[in-house]
Image: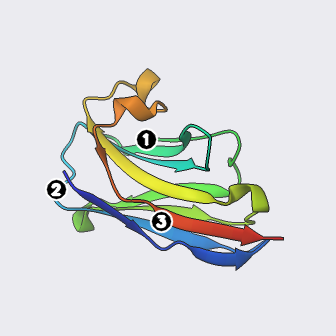
């Protein structure tokens, strides 16, 4: 599948943003769609994931309580709702998808075969 992430921008600390990930094909049962972020010189960090089958979600401890992942599978879209943004949230945010990812692997970037181009989020304090 092909993915396109958008919705990033430059905001002040405390603001909210909603990122969208549009998937070119149908998100079939068995797929997992995840959000990751990356800053220069660092590895991609898991943020959130949602499984097509059952809609179960996972959120990184670093953003729990502030970020939420949601989906509209009829529109082949997965969202990342971000609230109370902090300067430390500044990064390039990617959405990714993989088929047949087991739950224990869904937080690993390498488990996701397909990646979007990323959308930049800048939070100034």
Which of the two marks, 2 or 1, is nearer to us in this view?
2
Rendered position, 90 above or below 107: below
Determine the residue positioned at 32% across, 29% down: 101
Query: Residue 119 bears which disc, if any?
Result: 3
Q: CA distance from mark 2 to mark 1?
A: 18 Å
Rendered position, 48 above or below 11: above
Residue lying farthest to the front in this orientation: 41
| Camera-side residue of 77 and 85 | 85
Residue 20 on image: x %, y %: 42, 67
- Tag 2 or tag 3, which sits nearer the N-term? 2
Could you say whether the residue bearing mark 1 is in a helix, strand or loop? loop
Give yes or no for contact between labels 1 and 3 (Cβ–Cβ under 8 Å): no
Residue 51 on image: x %, y %: 36, 41
Dot 2, crowdedness within 10 Å: few (<14), some or many (≥20)?
few
Dot 1, crowdedness within 10 Å: few (<14), some or many (≥20)?
few
Residue lying farthest to the right in this orientation: 125
Determine the residue positioned at 64% across, 77% down: 10
Q: CA distance from mark 1 to mark 3?
A: 24 Å
Which residue bears the numbered disc 1?
56
Determine the residue positioned at 49% across, 32% down: 107
Which of the two marks, 3 or 2, is nearer to us in this view?
3
Which of the two marks, 1 or 3, is nearer to us in this view?
3
Rendered position, 60 above or below 118: above
Residue 59 on image: x %, y %: 58, 42
Which residue bears the numbered disc 2?
26
Could you say whether the residue bearing mark 2 is in a helix, strand or loop? loop
Could you say whether the residue bearing mark 3 is in a helix, strand or loop? strand
């Amino acid at each position: 599948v092909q993915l396109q992430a958008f919705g990033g921008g430059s905001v002040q600390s405390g603001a909210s943003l909603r990122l969208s990930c549009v998937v070119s094909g149908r998100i079939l049962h068995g797929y997992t769609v995840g959000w990751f972020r990356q800053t220069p010189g660092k590895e991609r960090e898991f943020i959130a994931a949602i499984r097509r089958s059952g809609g179960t979600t996972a959120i990184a401890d670093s953003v729990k309580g502030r970020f939420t992942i949601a989906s509209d599978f009829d529109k082949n879209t997965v969202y990342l709702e971000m609230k109370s943004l902090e300067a430390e949230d500044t990064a390039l945010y990617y959405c990714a998808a993989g088929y047949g990812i087991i739950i224990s692997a869904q937080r690993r970037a390498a488990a996701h075969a397909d990646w979007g181009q990323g959308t930049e989020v800048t939070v100034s304090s």
